[in-house]
C-alpha cells in the first residue's frame, strides 16, 4: 500500500511538469532597415525580427544631460530623480510586483497550518453523561498539485509583471527628465525674451522722450508721436506676459522636482548654449530593447499569454492532497490518556456543466492576448515615428537657426543704418520704427528657435529610450 502511494506521488509529480497553453516564443515584427531622416527619398526594406532573440539594452544614461554643460539643469535633474512623486509611485509598483511573485510561487508549495481546541461539557462525541474534558491539537497540510501548470503560468505572469514595472519606472524616468529639460529650456527662452523686451522698452522710452520734445517744438507731426507711443506700448505689454509665463514655468519645474513652487536659478544664457550636440547612429531594431514602453508592451503580451494558460487550466479538474497529524486527549494536563491521530486524503474537483462559461473565459483571454499584440505593434510604430520626427526636427531646426542668426545680424545693421538716416532727415520715422520692430522680432524668434532645438535634443533622449555614449 505504501509503495502504491509512492508511485502515485511520483506519477503526479511527473505529470505536473506539463502545462496547458502555449509557451511564449517571442513576436515576429517588421522593422525598417534604417531611419529615413538622412535620406527622405529612402525606401527601406523591412526586416523580420523575432523579439525573443534580442538582448535587453543597458540602463539609461542619466549623466547624458551633462552634454549641455549647464550646472543648473544638472542639479534639477538629480533633484527630480530624488524627489519626484511619480517616480516614487512607480518604485512602489515594482515592490508590489515583487511581492506578487512571492505569492504566486507559494501556490506551488504545500500549505501548512495548525489547529487546537479544548472542550468541556456533558455532551461529547454524541454521548450524554457526566462532565468531561476533551482537547485536540494537530497540524495539517493542503497541497494542490499544479497538474495543468496553472500556478506556473501565474508565476510566468508575475515575472513579466516585475519586468513591466521596472521598465515602466524607466519610462516614467525618461519622460520626466525630457519634460523637465523642455521646461527648463522654455524658462531660459522666456527669460531671454523678457530681457529683450526690457532692453527694447528702455530704448523706446528714450526715443519717445526725444520724439515728444521734437513734437513740442513743432518739428515732427503728430503721427510720428503716435507711432512712437504705439511701439513703446507694444514693448511694455510684452513684459508682464513673459513674467507671467516665467512664474508658471518655474512652478512646473518645482512640481517636477518634487518641491513647492519657488524661483528657479538662472543658468546659461540661451544665446550661449551649445547647439552642436553629437547625434548617435541608432538603428530601428535598437528601439525594441532601448525603448521602455516597447519592452513594457511586450511584457504585457507575455502576461496575457500566461493568463490564457491559466484560463485553460481552470477548465480542467484540480487535484489536491490533505493530511493531518495530531494528538487528542481527555485531560489537557496529562498526555498519558491521549492518543495520536492522523489522516491523509486526496480530492479531485472540476467543472461539469457550466454552459461554456469557462470556455468563453478562455476565449476572452485569447482575445485580450491578441489585443496586447496589436498594442505592441502600435507602440513600436509610434516609437519609429518619434525618432523619425525628432531627427528631422533637429535637422531642420539647425538650418532654421542659421537663418535666424543671419536675420538678427541683418536687422541690427538695418536698425543702425535707419536711425542714422532718420537723424540726418533722409528717411521717415515710420521706416525707422519698422527697422526697430524687425530687430525686436528677430531677437525674439532667435530665442524661440534656440529653445526648440535644445528641447528637440531632450525629445530625442526620450524617443531613443535614454541617453547615448558621447565620443570624446
Image (tube, rainbow, N blue to C red):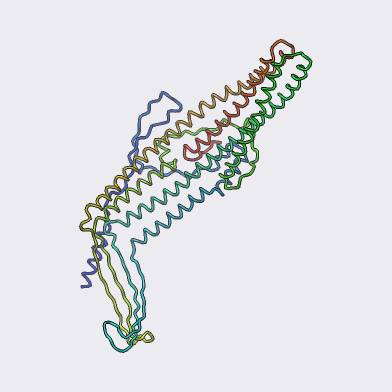
* Side (left or right) of 420 relative to 91: right
Measuring from the top left, give residue 35's x and y in whole percent: 42, 30
Decide which of 424, 416 is in the foreground and name it: 424
* Side (left or right) of 351 relative to 180: left
Measuring from the top left, give residue 97's x and y in whole percent: 42, 54
Measuring from the top left, give residue 338's x and y in whole percent: 32, 84
Pick the quarter of the image with the N terminus.
Answer: bottom left
Residue pushed farthest bottom?
130
> Residue visible at 69% across and 29% down?
198
User: Which quarter of the picture shows residue 152?
Assistant: bottom left
User: Which quarter of the picture shows residue 205?
Assistant: top right
Image height of 262 relative to 282, above or below: below
* Side (left or right) of 338 relative to 415: left
* Side (left or right) of 393 relative to 3: right
Measuring from the top left, give residue 142's x and y in whole percent: 31, 67
Image height of 45 relative to 254, above or below: above
Residue pushed farthest right?
217
Pick the quarter of the image with the C terminus.
Answer: top right
The answer to whether any part of residue 134 appears in the image is yes
The answer to whether any part of residue 417 appears in the image is no
Amino acid at each position: 500500500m505504501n509503495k502504491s502511494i509512492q508511485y502515485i506521488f511520483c506519477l503526479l509529480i511527473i505529470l505536473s511538469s506539463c502545462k496547458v497553453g502555449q509557451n511564449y516564443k517571442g513576436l515576429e515584427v517588421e522593422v525598417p532597415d534604417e531611419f529615413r531622416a538622412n535620406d527622405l527619398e529612402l525606401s527601406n526594406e523591412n526586416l523580420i525580427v523575432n523579439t525573443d532573440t534580442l538582448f535587453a539594452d543597458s540602463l539609461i544614461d542619466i549623466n547624458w544631460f551633462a552634454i549641455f554643460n549647464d550646472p543648473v539643469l544638472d542639479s534639477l535633474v538629480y533633484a527630480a530623480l530624488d524627489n519626484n512623486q511619480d517616480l516614487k509611485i512607480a518604485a512602489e509598483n515594482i515592490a508590489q510586483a515583487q511581492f506578487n511573485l512571492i505569492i504566486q510561487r507559494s501556490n506551488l508549495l504545500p500549505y501548512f497550518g495548525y489547529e487546537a481546541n479544548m472542550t468541556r461539557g456533558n455532551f461529547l462525541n454524541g454521548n450524554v453523561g457526566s462532565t468531561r474534558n476533551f482537547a485536540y491539537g494537530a497540524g495539517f497540510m493542503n497541497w494542490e498539485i499544479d497538474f495543468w501548470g496553472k500556478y506556473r503560468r501565474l508565476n510566468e505572469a508575475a515575472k513579466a509583471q516585475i519586468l513591466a514595472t521596472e521598465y515602466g519606472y524607466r519610462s516614467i524616468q525618461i519622460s520626466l527628465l525630457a519634460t523637465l529639460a523642455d521646461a527648463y529650456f522654455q524658462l531660459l527662452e522666456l527669460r531671454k525674451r523678457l530681457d529683450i523686451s526690457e532692453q527694447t522698452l528702455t530704448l523706446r522710452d528714450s526715443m519717445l522722450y526725444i520724439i515728444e520734445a521734437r513734437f513740442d517744438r513743432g518739428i515732427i507731426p503728430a503721427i510720428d508721436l503716435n507711432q512712437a507711443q504705439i511701439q513703446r506700448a507694444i514693448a511694455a505689454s510684452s513684459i508682464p506676459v513673459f513674467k507671467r509665463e516665467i512664474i508658471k514655468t518655474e512652478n512646473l519645474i518645482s512640481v517636477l522636482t518634487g518641491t513647492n513652487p519657488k524661483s528657479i536659478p538662472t543658468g546659461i544664457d540661451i544665446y550661449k548654449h551649445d547647439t552642436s550636440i553629437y547625434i548617435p547612429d541608432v538603428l530601428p531594431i535598437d528601439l525594441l530593447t532601448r525603448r521602455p514602453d516597447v519592452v513594457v508592451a511586450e511584457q504585457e503580451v507575455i502576461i496575457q499569454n500566461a493568463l490564457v494558460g491559466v484560463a485553460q487550466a481552470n477548465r480542467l479538474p484540480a487535484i489536491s492532497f490533505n493530511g493531518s497529524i495530531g494528538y487528542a486527549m481527555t485531560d489537557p494536563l496529562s498526555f498519558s490518556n491521549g492518543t495520536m491521530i492522523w489522516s491523509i486524503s486526496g480530492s479531485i474537483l472540476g467543472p461539469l456543466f457550466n454552459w461554456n462559461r469557462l470556455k468563453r473565459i478562455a476565449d476572452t483571454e485569447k482575445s485580450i492576448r491578441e489585443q496586447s499584440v496589436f498594442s505592441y505593434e502600435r507602440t513600436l510604430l509610434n516609437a519609429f515615428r518619434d525618432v523619425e520626427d525628432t531627427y528631422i526636427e533637429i535637422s531642420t531646426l539647425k538650418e532654421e537657426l542659421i537663418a535666424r542668426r543671419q536675420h538678427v545680424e541683418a536687422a541690427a545693421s538695418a536698425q543702425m543704418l535707419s536711425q542714422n538716416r532718420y537723424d540726418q532727415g533722409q528717411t521717415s520715422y515710420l521706416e525707422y520704427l519698422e527697422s526697430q520692430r524687425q530687430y525686436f522680432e528677430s531677437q525674439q524668434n532667435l530665442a524661440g528657435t534656440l529653445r526648440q532645438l535644445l528641447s528637440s535634443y531632450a525629445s530625442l533622449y526620450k524617443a531613443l529610450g535614454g541617453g547615448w555614449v558621447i565620443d570624446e
